[in-house]
Image (cartoon, rainbow, N blue to C red):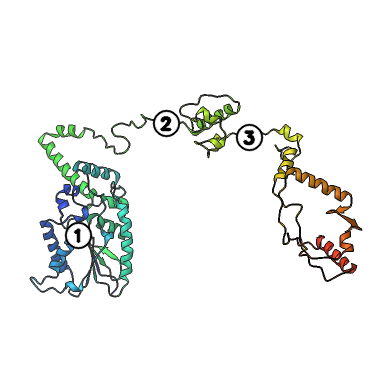
Amino acid sequence: MGRPRLIILIRHAQSEGNKNRDIHQTIPDHRVKLTEDGWQQAREAGRRLRALLRPEDTLQFYTSPYRRTRETTEGILETLTSDEPDPSPFKREKMKVYEEPRLREQDFGNFQPCSAEMERMWQERADYGHFFYRIPNGESAADAYDRVSGFNESLWRQFGEDDFASVCVLVTHGLMSRVFLMKWYHFSVEYFEDLRNVNHCEFLIMKKQEDSGKYDLENNLRTWSELRRERAVVKAKEEKDLVDSGKAAKVERQNSIPIPPRKWGGCPQGCNHGKNFKIRRDLAELRQHDENCANAKNGLTHTVPEVNGTIASRRSPAKKVQGSHHSEDDSDDPRGRTAPQIDVTKAQEEVVSSPDGTPSYITIEDRLRNALKTPQKSSFLHTGRDFGGTYSGHASEEDFSENDARERLAAKAARVKNGERNGVPLTNGRDSSTVRHAHANKLGDQSSDGGDEAEEDLDKAEQEDKSVRGSVY
């Protein structure tokens, strides 16, 4: 069938919490049940709903999961489906009833405090605004609005089903009924806060227009501004009667007494929060304080820091002389670190360590000593034919001391100067051993090839392999 022809919002009947608010101090809000008068109101609402419907109508109920709303739904269904005084066209088995948690009451926070505190809270909410005021440990009407917005979207999707009922009934709470209308009809926050609450088991009827498909609200909602206007008319009439009776001067004196406005924020009883601590100064003064402490530290002089300084200034004198890596208070605070002092004169006398002329602290002796201690490939590796590393039976590196390295480097330089390589005399740039003797591979096997021609080809290939043209780089 599509969209229902009627959407009816019903506030629950009278509950024990409506009759005695102190009951919320011991019973959770969702467990508060109906009073005997509330059950009578629910049954009477069922009779009124039965008179409002057509015999061919189908119904679908959505109820808040709170006990008072579920009991109100049961009371409505009891008289709606009753065959007294006449047989009812509405059968219980043909109705769909859903519990919808998004229709629950505004959360007022678990167990409520005493009546005096609750009364103070209601006055504070009235001054702050009903829509945005959030109950301590509870919700605001704006939070309830978000819940209802999600429910409305779900409801619209169900309206698209062909078998949806012709009448949709929502059994909920007073504030939720107003929030539902606010979302549906786009009420402003000011108009919502001006609305008065809905009476128990009062119907808010939304009827679909056949031509446009929109829903018109058939109720005239009561507002506080309208009530104030009515009271103003009554008060003006009473004052006129007092003037006629000669008591106007006394009334004028009563009205002239000023009423002090209530103050909820801040400290109504007087502020003493600054009694036990000192307020820090602005950031510029703190930075200047840190700079003074840093300058005093660089000059090897100690100044007593002020009590209200930063972390760096409050550090004990023993920690001030430590390096930045010993800091336990502000190791991540760059304002507490001291910039290193660069000895430019010394750096200019030594060899510069980088191409861009950056001064260096490292002397030539330190560089040579560090180069000798740096792990490097040994100069006495036994390389293979492809120069890719050692062959079987030899270690990859040798351990040697600094003196051994110096002696070996000096011996190698002497051999090169005398025309030898690895202790073998050179002949026309080649080793005499490779010219006069047959080659053997690295495993000790004799090569099958022989002759000077093969040796020359091998030397030529080796030189080409070592050249730039033969390099893989």
Tag 2, which secondary structure?
A: loop
Q: Amino acid at mark 3?
A: Pro
Return the residue found at the far left.
85
* Quadrant housing residue 368: top right
Q: Position of residue 356 (x, y in %)?
A: 73, 43
Q: On the rendered structure, is 107 left or right of 288?
A: left
Asked if disc 1 and disc 3 are in contact, CB closer than 8 Å, the reply is no
3D distance between C-alphas at marks 2 and 3 = 34 Å
Q: Which residue is mark 1?
A: 69
- Residue 421, which numbered label? none
Q: Earlier in the sequence, mark 1 or mark 3?
A: 1
Tag 3, which secondary structure?
A: loop
3D distance between C-alphas at marks 2 and 1 = 53 Å
- Placement of 214 over or under 253, stated as above or below: below
Q: Amino acid at mark 2?
A: Ile
Q: Amino acid at mark 1?
A: Thr
Return the residue found at the far right.
428
Label 2 packing within 10 angstroms: few (<14), some (14-19), many (20+):
few
Q: Earlier in the sequence, mark 2 or mark 1?
A: 1
- Residue 340, which numbered label? 3
Q: Which mark is nearer the camera, 1 or 3?
A: 3
Residue pictured at 30% horizontal, 44% vertical: 128
Label 1 packing within 10 angstroms: few (<14), some (14-19), many (20+):
many
Residue pictured at 33% horizontal, 30% vertical: 272
Q: Which mark is nearer the camera, 2 or 1?
A: 2
- Residue 279, which numbered label? 2
- Placement of 287 over or under 161, stated as above or below: above
* Quadrant housing residue 209: bottom left
Residue pictured at 25% horizontal, 50% vertical: 110
3D distance between C-alphas at marks 1 and 3 = 76 Å
